[in-house]
Image (cartoon, rainbow, N blue to C red):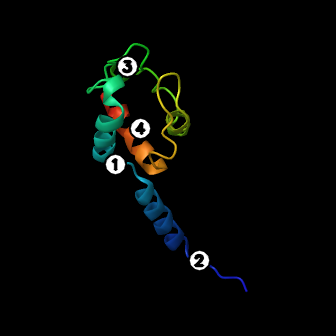
Amino acid sequence: MNIKIPHSIVFILLVLANVAQASDVNQGRDIYQRHCAMCHGVNGSAGMAGAADFKRGQGLMQSDRSLLERIQSGKNACPAYRGILTEQQTLDVIAYIRTLF
């Protein structure tokens, strides 16, 4: 049995999938304030030595997927957030920190 699905239905489903995956900058800001601001600064200007300065774009010139892995795994003094933040929450934070540059 071969079922043909109209292209318009496929397109709508793809659009809806992207909407479901869209990042929420406001949610990202709230998470950032709770988990990241103490080291990276309230406005993204590094507050702790060695922390990326998002105001200067440090660490932001990579894909969301790379940043997601970095945040989930941790680096140096920054703890791993895998198991603390969901993937969607982490993507929300990434969307927010990109607004700081």
| Residue type at the position of mark 2 | Ile
- Circle 3 packing at 10 Å, graded few (<14), some (14-19), many (20+), is many
Nearer to us: label 4 or label 2: 4
Q: Quadrant of residue 2?
A: bottom right
Nearest the viewer among 59 and 38 is 38
Residue extending furthest toward the right: 1
- Circle 4 packing at 10 Å, graded few (<14), some (14-19), many (20+), is many
In the image, 38: left or right of 75?
left
For the residues bearing labels 2 and 3, Cβ distance under 8 angstroms = no
The residue wearing badge 1 is 24
For marks 2 and 1 on the same chain, the one whose residue lies earlier in the sequence: 2
| Residue type at the position of mark 1 | Asp
- What label does residue 5 carry, if any? 2
Q: Is residue 25 visible?
A: yes
The residue wearing badge 4 is 94
In the image, 56: left or right of 77?
left
Nearest the viewer among 28 and 86 is 86
